[in-house]
Image: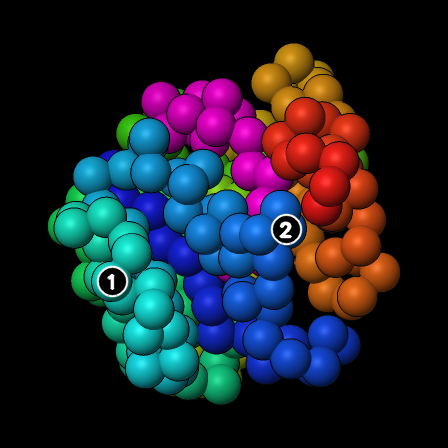
Amino acid sequence: MTSIILAGGRSLRFGRSKALETIAGKSLIRWVIDRLTPLSSEIIIVTPQPDCFPWLAANIPLSSKIIADIYPGKGPLGGIYTGLTASASSHAVVAGCDMPFLNVALLDYMIQISPVADIVVPRIGAWVEPLCAVYSKNCLAPIHNLLEHNELRISTLFNMAKVKYVEEDELDRLDPEHLSFFNINTQADLNEARKLAVETGLASAEY
């Protein structure tokens, strides 16, 4: 299984690169890497500017790489396309670089059921989380078509692929607090994440 981390957002609401912000002395992107490593034969980090992470290149698993977004400025859909193109696996977990509390059990469950679909994605009511999901290379052609027509909504892709939804009862069993979907867009979110890391025992109180 490949894991793809999207680190291409402009962080407009945050005002600076989110990937490099820290929780318990560890960058957000490192938190994500550490969550995905047990599940992955390779990790691909997609970013418009690979040279922005020189320190990371020397500290990621040997089977991992940082690559330039083929469609910079096209949002997560472009990043997913880039990662899938480079992936050595038929399926890949896709996550944002600002999701420090990804639940390994939930991700493993989605990986296990991924052969039955082109996309496996969590759903709560009408809400879905496309950046904590599994995508297959079958998505490459429809994503390319969408990008070429400047249609950047991932929800449109869902109408063009075979989707398996992980419903709320399954999510409650595997990730009861739904912390996998906690992402960081503002300083307040980062402050809350630091508190959660302490409360959940993932970090010591000194942080």
Locate residue 186, reporting x and y percent. 78, 67
Residue in the picture at 61% in, 58% down: 22
What's the distance in space between the residues labelled 2 and 1, CA to CA? Answer: 20 Å
Residue in the picture at 36% in, 22% down: 112
Locate residue 48, reporting x and y percent. 39, 82
Q: Earlier in the sequence, mark 2 or mark 1?
A: 2
Locate residue 53, reporting x and y percent. 37, 73
Left or right of 206, for residue 46: left
Res 131 visible: no
Instruction: Residue 181: say if magenta.
Output: no
Above or below, 100 against 189 in this view is above
Locate residue 130, reporting x and y percent. 56, 51
Residue in the picture at 74% in, 57% down: 190
Res 186 visible: yes
Residue bearing the label numbered 1: 58
Between residue 169 and residue 34, name the one nearer to us: 34
| Numbered marks: total | 2
Above or below, 3 against 7 in this view is above
Assign the C terminus to one quadrant of the image: top right
Q: Amino acid at mark 1?
A: Ala
Residue 185: quadrant of the picture: bottom right
Q: Amino acid at mark 2?
A: Ile
Residue in the picture at 32% in, 82% down: 51
* Range of magenta residues: 96-112
> What's the mark number on residue 23?
2
> What's the mark number on residue 80?
none
Between residue 115 and residue 5, name the one nearer to us: 5
Between residue 31 and residue 88, name the one nearer to us: 31
Instruction: Residue 104: say if magenta.
Output: yes
| SS at circle 2 | strand
**Mark 2 Cα shell of 10 Å, populated few (<14), some (14-19), many (≥20):** many
Q: Residue furthest front?
A: 206
